[in-house]
Amino acid sequence: MTLFNLKYNWTELAQDLDNLNDQIISMSEELKDLNATLEKNLSASTIIRTAEQLPGVNEKVKHPVGGIEYKLLDIIMSLNDEYKWTREQIADWIETLGVDTTFKTVYTETEQEEETQ
């Protein structure tokens, strides 16, 4: 093997490594996008599951800031996200509403089948 061939192979190797690095960066960005999508979907499914377990969040109540009636769940998210209320402030306000905030047991189909066996 000559010195020329050795330099040529190192040049090819460097180019291949650059290409590999570009592919890794691209995959990393795709994984970040996928992770964001999964987090969003998980949040949505968690909210839906919570609404099933806590039917009171579907009741319409008056927004403490805006004064307009909305579902309690929507108001809770608004107070947290838009008005930056603490969890304690939101909980204290909910206690004044007289809404049933008792968690209900909600079973999946598999859990129901196991329960009946």
Image (cartoon, grey):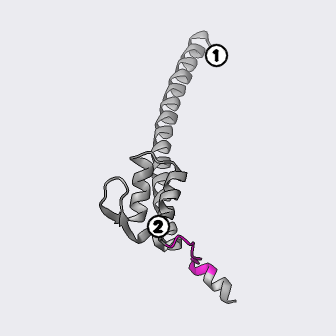
Furthest residue toward bottom: 117
Furthest residue toward front: 96
Task: Please name whichever residue, 44 or 31, is drawn nearer the observer in this view of the structure.
Answer: 44
Tell me residue 75's x, y (percent): 39, 58
Q: Residue at x 66, y 89 (%)?
A: 116
Task: Please name whichever residue, 92 or 105, is drawn nearer the observer in this view of the structure.
Answer: 92
Give the mark nearer the N terminus: 1 vs 2: 1
Majority secondary structure of the magenta segment?
loop
On the picture, is 73 further left or further right than 16? left
Above or below — where is 110 with respect to 10?
A: below
Tell me residue 93's x, y (percent): 47, 58
Cβ atoms at labels 1 and 2 below 8 Å apart: no
Residue type indicated by callout 1 = Met
Furthest residue toward right: 117
Read off the residue under disc 1.
Answer: 1
| Rendering quarter of residue 5 | top right
Q: CA distance from mark 1 to mark 2?
A: 67 Å
| Mark whose residue sits in front, 1 or 2 | 2
Magenta region: which residues? 100-111
As for residue 109 lying within the magenta part, the answer is yes
Task: Please name whichever residue, 23 or 7, is drawn nearer the observer in this view of the structure.
Answer: 23
Under circle 2, the secondary element is helix
Above or below — where is 47 with respect to 102?
A: above
| Residue 22: mark in rendering | none
| Rendering quarter of residue 17 | top right
As for residue 79 lying within the magenta part, the answer is no
Task: Please name whichever residue, 16 or 56, is drawn nearer the observer in this view of the structure.
Answer: 56
Read off the residue under disc 2.
Answer: 48
Above or below — where is 41 with respect to 108?
A: above
Residue type indicated by callout 2 = Ile
